[in-house]
Image (cartoon, grey):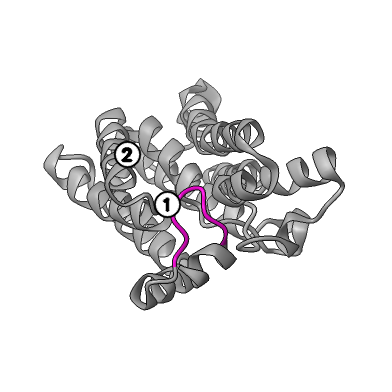
Amino acid sequence: MLWIAYGLLVIVVSYLFGSIPTGYLAGRILKGIDIREHGSKSIGATNVLRTLGKVPALVVLWVDVLKGVTAILFTRWLYSLPTVAVTIPNGIVAQTWIDWAVTLAALMAILGHSRSVWIRFTGGKSAATGLGVLLTMCWQVGLGAGIVFGLVLAIFRIVSLSSISAAIAAIALMWIFWQPLAYQLMTIAGGLYVIWRHQANIQRLIAGTEPRLGQTHQESQQS
């Protein structure tokens, strides 16, 4: 039954990686504020940009991406250990088992970012951590989703719309690049979760009040 213990280890470690509240820590360290009380109330890089500036936002963005990367790398490293590999149940192809373990790690990292145990289960939208997950699971999918994000952002200057578009693109790209079923299902679940986390943004998009890059929420409502 050691395979259950290793699965639980993947769940806990991946969640803890994802739950590091980077944006919240940036607010506390740089300005002594709780960033959840400012702007969009999110701890993501976009709200950090509006509240703290460009450099902190870039740092938060990359750390949030690396949280997803680290969760997947940890899981692959763990299952590369001979003492762990031999615990895979008989009759199951090792690579298939690892694919599902990686999928579990990905989902837990995404969940951890949006529901961090360190800040009372609040958090961000999980887009950046999701990108890190995608880049590590299949770099072509991650790169493609990143390109979609960049193109939509360049055209519309709306981060939430770009994130939603990238999530939808990732679902399609996982299928186009013939990734394992576990990865495809993870991307569907993770993509829908990221979109669901943008409910308030979607309402503002429909109402035409969603801030563009460089705007505050107040400025968008006045325009």
The single residue placed furthest to the right in the displayed view is 32
Residue hosting label 2: 150
User: Which residue is at a point 46% across and 29% down the rendered structure image?
Assistant: 76
Residue 32 versus residue 76 in the image, above or below: below
Is residue 43 left or right of 215 when viewed as pictured? Answer: right
Mark 2 Cα shell of 10 Å, populated few (<14), some (14-19), many (≥20): some
Residue 139 versus residue 163 in the image, above or below: above
Q: Give the amino acid at mark 1.
A: Val
- On residue 130, the disc is none
Q: Quadrant location of residue 30?
A: top right
User: How far apart, in angstroms, are the residues tagged by discs 1 and 2?
Assistant: 9 Å
Q: Give the amino acid at mark 2.
A: Gly
Q: Which residues are magenta?
A: 210-216
Mark 1 Cα shell of 10 Å, populated few (<14), some (14-19), many (≥20): many
In the rendered image, residue 167 lying in the magenta stretch gets the answer no
Is residue 43 left or right of 62 when viewed as pictured? Answer: right
Q: Are marks 1 and 2 in contact (CB under 8 Å)?
A: no
The single residue placed furthest to the front in the displayed view is 223
Which secondary structure, mark 1?
helix
Total marks placed? 2
Q: Position of residue 98 (x, y in %)?
A: 39, 37
Residue 21 visible here: no
Q: Position of residue 118 (x, y in %)?
A: 77, 54
Residue hosting label 1: 159
Q: Compare residues 88 and 110 and report the one nearer the observer.
A: 110
Q: Compare residues 83 and 11 and report the one nearer the observer.
A: 11
Which secondary structure, mark 2?
helix
- First reached walking from the N terminus: tag 1 or tag 2: 2
Main SS, magenta region, reads: loop
